[in-house]
Amino acid sequence: MRPIIFSKMDFSHSSLFGYIEDLQELTIIERPVRRSLKTPEEIERLTVDEELSDIERAVYLLSSGQDIQGTSVVANLPVLMRQNPAETLRRVLPKIREVLHVAGVEMQLTAAVSFLTVLQEESVSIHTYSHSFLHIILQNLEHRDAGVSNAWLETLLAVIEALPKETVRHEILNPLVSKAQLSQTLQSRLVSCKIMGKVANKFEAHIVKREVLPLVKSLCQDVEYEVRACMCRQLEHVARGIGTELTKTVVLPELVELARDEGSSVRLAAFETLVNLLDMFDADDRSQTVLPLVKSFCEKSFKTDESILVSLSFHLGKLCNGLYGIFTPEQHLRFLEFYKKLSTLGLQQENGHNDNQLHLQTLEQEKKYISVRKNCAYNFPAMIVFVDPKNFHLELYSIFFCLCHDPEVPVRCTMAISFFEVAKLLNSDVYTIHKELVTLLQDESLEVLDALVGHLPEILELMTNRGENNGSESKLLSIPDLIPALTTAEQRAATSLKWRTHEKLLQKYACLPHIISSDQIYYRFIHRMLTIILTNNVLPVQKAAARTLCVYLRYNRKQEQRHEVIQKLIEQLGQGKSYWNRLRFLDTCEFIMELFSKSFFCKYFFLPVLELTHDPVANVRMKLCCLLPKVKSTLKIPTDKHLLQQLELCIRKLLCQEKDKDVLTIVKRTVLELDRMEISVDAFLKRFYENDLLDQEKERQEHLLLEMEQLEKEKQKNEGRSTNINDKMFEKKRRDSKTSSVLAKSINLSISGSSSGTSAGKEEKKSKLVRSQSFSTQVLHPKYSNIDKCPNKSSATGYTSSVPGMGKSCMLSFSDDSFRTHAAGNSGNAAFPSSSSRNLFNSADQKSNGNKESQSRKMSM
């Protein structure tokens, strides 16, 4: 060890004095904190008698309390209205009206929100509300603070929808005539504009024409550009209220005039209103009036008026599709080129100038250009409709490529959100955007990945089902780099701090059994899910990985792989050294009970779960006790009678030996719940009918998986045997080439006879294989949305189960053999095969397979 050197430390007087100064600075920092504490006198003034009722306390605080206390009373007004509306209206509301005259901004904003809440909760009738609250709202509508005025205006606009017409006419519309005059303040005229738009939808067209339209025209000609722009944005609501004819004769001329206004904000408002009212104009108005205005807007946007560029790019998709019927081919091409130019705006600028002013101007325009390209990405699905999906590759693919590779994250995020819509529109041509899907999955920004993952299952289904390679055996060929992209995306999400994105990604990966092969999932994803469950520190991520792993196990097509995964779950989770892993094992068992049949859970997981009753950690035992009712609901009598005895034995041991008070409390509560439960039996009962049908369907699917695996193995063996026989016969022909032609003909006949015999023997197996493969594509791979969001059917036992891909209308086919036996009145063993019947079924299958193989050998001999 090195000796500690003290010579480097400075103990001089100056350094010590510096330390003391630092300490004094710390004490100075604490002084304001001490001064901010309340004095005894202030505490006395804030103290209220506890014996006062809520109404009396509210009146007292509004009369003599501080501002913060009065604000709390105003915020509590909806509660007082629910409890005692009469007393609140009589005593509290008049005090609030008095206080609001001198109240600050915070109390004003709180009062506006409370008045709106009282209206929404319908604590009083609308007549009482208009009599008590409307005058207070109108008094504070022209507050000097713009934020307060807007808050009261929002409340008034919501009140107008609920008020009767006569009240609106007398209390709001008539005073509005004077408020909209030029002699009034700017704030008063702006408020009048917004009220006009709301009132126009309240009355009939002739009343609006007589009383509202004159005010609208005068406000459209106001001297202040803010008033003209505000009234221009309200013309859409006015047009909806007066109808098509008056819109054509009154509103459209005003819009044309406002579109040529000197103020850029007024022109922008006129353009957006025109786009929103396209459906109210006929073909003549669109071609003669609207289209020339739109052309001038597009031409000026790059030359003189870039202020409307962002709005123009945002409304371009709606504009192009709204004017689609009147475009000539030349105009159609011109608008398409304009969209392409906007999509690459800011990316193709030359950097030949070094002027600082030009550089600063470029920096100022950069955000605007990013917004324009983002809007182009937002409108991309609309532009596909505009050019026709058949022309996508020729007209828009280059723009699609540029937007997916845009250097800015917001643009790529918008493309990721729109990707599903693009895939739906392309339909059978969706294979043309496979590379861009892989690119977005491998994007360096997690925001892009999070935006894409929302519809990832639907996108992958469109890719595999409607792509160029539509066969089940060539699913991976349709998206060559899909699996590396998916694994890369998951690893990037795992190494980041955004665990919600990681959880969402793992949940969506449950769709992969419908997309890629079982072997690919086993070798590339199952072990990764196990690793996440064992090593990740975020509980929602672990649960998402556990559920996705159970889905993979549910649709795995090889029994050896299934047994290996089950063994790892039991050994590494259920018997793991960390109590955290054992808790995750119980979570996994819940997912197993949800996705698999009762017999599957009882066969593999029932006893390992019961072993945790001896767990040394109380939290594990506590969670197990909460899970026991679901565990008991998986039993069927008399098949699982021995498992029921094991369950009762474990519960007795817990009652007798448990020392932890919390666990013992839960055990006693669980025992009462278990006593009230009724166990389902092998035969159908009415109270378990629906759950039994669901469980039977799960069990049938699991048997079909085993049968399908066996048939595939037999198919491979038969194919290998046929190739070996053909090779041997070819060698024999070559050796016996000198024999007579008659002998050769007999040999050929025998060979053809044996092949026909084997083909006849294989016909039944082939039909079974086709049926199982159809099951694998339809029932075995249901829609992933059904896997994740299927409705859970709860029974009296508290057991929740869900069957993927089964709706209310098609729970079970009534042509099923088991259903037929039940309808004929057979015993329950026919409907619900027990473990012994399953063994007999498997052994009978093996015997039949052996007999078929021996027959085929005899025929070949």
Image: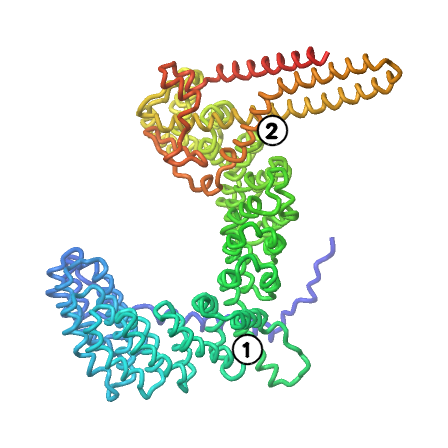
* Depth check, front residue: 192 or 360: 192
Name above or below for residue 437 compared with residue 688: below
Figure quadrant of residue 61:
bottom left
Tell me, yes or no, if residue 57 can be seen here.
yes
Figure quadrant of residue 272:
bottom left
The alpha-carbon separation of the residues under discs 2 and 1 comes to 59 Å
* Depth check, front residue: 226 or 677: 226
Q: What secondary structure is marked by label 1?
A: helix
The percent position of residue 511, horizontal first and vertical second, equals 53, 42
The tag earlier along the polypeptide, 2 or 1, is 1
Q: Which residue is mark 1?
A: 365
Q: Is residue 645 left or right of residue 470?
A: left
Q: Which residue is mark 2?
A: 558
Q: Are marks 2 and 1 in contact (CB under 8 Å)?
A: no
The percent position of residue 307, horizontal first and vertical second, equals 48, 79
Q: State the residue at coordinates (48%, 73%).
A: 310
Q: Is residue 466 left or right of residue 687?
A: right
Q: Quadrant of the C terminus?
A: top right
- Judged from this view, the residue extending furthest toward the right is 738
